[in-house]
């Protein structure tokens, strides 16, 4: 009977989608403060730098810039903010695309999961808030019915 393999396939696909766990009412912008500074990834054909300013009471600003052969290949303005209701959002303004906001749905053991299921791709932005010199971030979601994910690993560097 084909039912068992199909059920296993469906269960596997559902497990791949990040699940929200309740947010603590104590989640604050200060919980993101170790993002502050510059982060760099050397790529085969270029370099990517992410720079975050320290959080204020209501927002934290960042910018990501990727260059290849000395020319800008990609940039993104980012903002983590807390509204009057205490909701934390990640707002991204990537080069050539519309500004999109993602709501913080989980913050567990330093891993922040932001979600916008209405967005084409990604539907999830995930940051493992660093406790050292390595920043791990990722984007995940569905494209044409298939789960996709991209991870970004950057290392702390001096801001020049």
Image: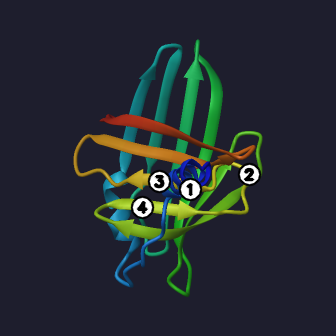
N-terminal label among 3 and 4: 4
**What residue would you read off at disc 2?**
120
**What residue would you read off at disc 1?**
7
Residues at marks 1 and 4, CA–CA distance in whole angstroms: 30 Å
Residues at marks 3 and 4, CA–CA distance in whole angstroms: 6 Å
* Contact, mark 1 vs mark 3 (Cβ under 8 Å): no
Of circles 1 and 4, the one toward us is 1
**What residue would you read off at disc 4?**
112
* Contact, mark 3 vs mark 4 (Cβ under 8 Å): yes
Of circles 1 and 3, the one toward us is 1
N-terminal label among 3 and 2: 2
Q: 46 or 125, which is in the foreground?
A: 125
In the depicted structure, whether residue 32 falls above or below residue 152:
below
Name the secondary structure under disc 2.
Answer: loop
Q: Residue furthest front?
A: 1
Q: Residues within 10 Å of mark 4 (few under 14, many from 20)?
A: many
Q: Residues within 10 Å of mark 3 (few under 14, many from 20)?
A: many
Q: Residue at coordinates 67% horizontally, 63% vertically from top-left?
A: 117
Q: Residue at coordinates 47% horizontally, 40% vertically from top-left?
A: 50
Residues at marks 2 and 4, CA–CA distance in whole angstroms: 20 Å
């Amino acid at each position: 009977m084909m039912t068992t393999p199909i059920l296993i396939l469906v269960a596997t696909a559902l497990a791949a989608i990040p699940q929200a766990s309740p947010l603590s009412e104590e989640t604050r912008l200060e919980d993101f403060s170790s993002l502050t500074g510059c982060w760099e990834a050397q790529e085969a054909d270029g370099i990517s730098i992410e720079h975050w300013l320290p959080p204020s009471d209501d927002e934290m600003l960042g910018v990501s810039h990727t260059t290849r052969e000395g020319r800008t290949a990609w940039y993104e303005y980012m903002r983590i903010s807390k509204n009057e209701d205490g909701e934390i959002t990640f707002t991204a303004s990537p080069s050539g695309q519309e500004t999109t906001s993602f709501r913080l749905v989980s913050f567990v053991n330093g891993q922040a999961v932001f979600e916008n299921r209405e967005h084409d791709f990604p539907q999830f932005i995930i940051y493992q808030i660093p406790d050292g010199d390595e920043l791990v971030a990722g984007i995940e979601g569905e494209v044409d019915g298939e789960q996709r994910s991209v991870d970004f690993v950057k290392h702390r560097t001096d801001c020049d």
